[in-house]
Amino acid sequence: MPDSNAVNTMFARIAGRYDLANHLLSGGVDYWWRQRLVRAVHDAEPGAVLDLATGSGDVVFALADGLPPGVQLTGMDFCQPMLDEAVKKRATDPRWAAIDFRQGDGMALPLPAASYDALTISFGLRNMADRHQALQEMRRVLRPGGRLFVLEFSQPVFWFRPVYYAYLKFILPAVAAVVTGDRSAYEYLCGSIEQFPGREAMSAEIRRAGFSSVKATGLSLGIVALHEACA
């Protein structure tokens, strides 16, 4: 499992160019992945949403653009430099002024039980030191019947794996080194993607944490999955 301190330090190093690197390395498809998540959350019509591992805030800002006024939106991350980037973005658009950004560890959320209707986490679950504990914390802060939305890398369809893994091992770190100046951070991130469970195994982990009605949708030949579950 990842070391929390090392992950925090790594994200602090790349915070300033994290968004640019994501867009370039995904060929812009990350916008579409987030929109799939956002549409699913909007369909659930929540009154309060927590975006965990919010990073620089792209997901919670996208959520705000389509939810009705009065919905409580909170972005939480354990890396303060990433939150600083989110706060800078918030200041650029008055529609985002009410979004609350807070520092917090996904392993021990500084939140009362049953306080949110929906919880989203995008490309952050694989960086948790203990996924089971993190998922249990997510369930704790969700109200009964609340919805969990996990957007995360997964394992692609079989025939595409050699091409995909070659991209992760050789091309992605090299490009990221140019964009961010930090090749080692992306070598870690690529390794975490290769080791992450596929859709069925991840669905089983979510169920073991106490969630029900788990549904997984593969995106982009399965390299990403959107998991939805009920607390």
Image (cartoon, rainbow, N blue to C red):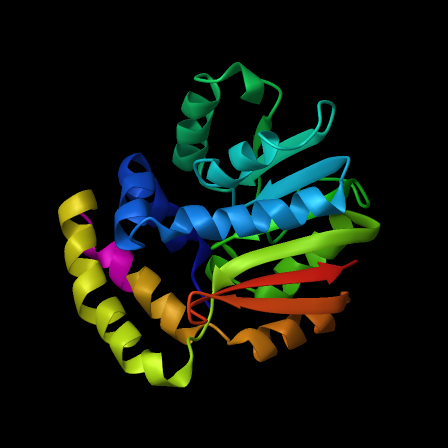
Quarter of the image holding residue 230? Answer: bottom right
**43 over 186 or under it: above or below:** above
- Looking at the picture, tell me which residue is in the foreground, 225 or 181: 225
Q: Is residue 207 left or right of residue 28?
A: right
Magenta stretch: give its range. 181-187
Identify which residue is drawn at 48% across, 35% down: 57
Quarter of the figure with the C terminus: bottom right
The x, y position of residue 175, in whole percent, is 17, 54
Identified at 37% across, 54% down, the residue is 6
Q: What secondary structure is the stretch in magenta mostly built from? A: helix
Q: Residue at x 43, y 17 (%)?
A: 92
Up the image or down, 95 lies above or below 33; here it is above
- Taking the spot 71% from the left edge, 68% from the top edge, the residue there is 214
> Closer to the camera, 229 or 195?
229
Q: Position of residue 116 (x, y in %)?
A: 76, 41
Count all numbered tags in the image, as a single digit: 0
* 185 falls in the magenta region: yes
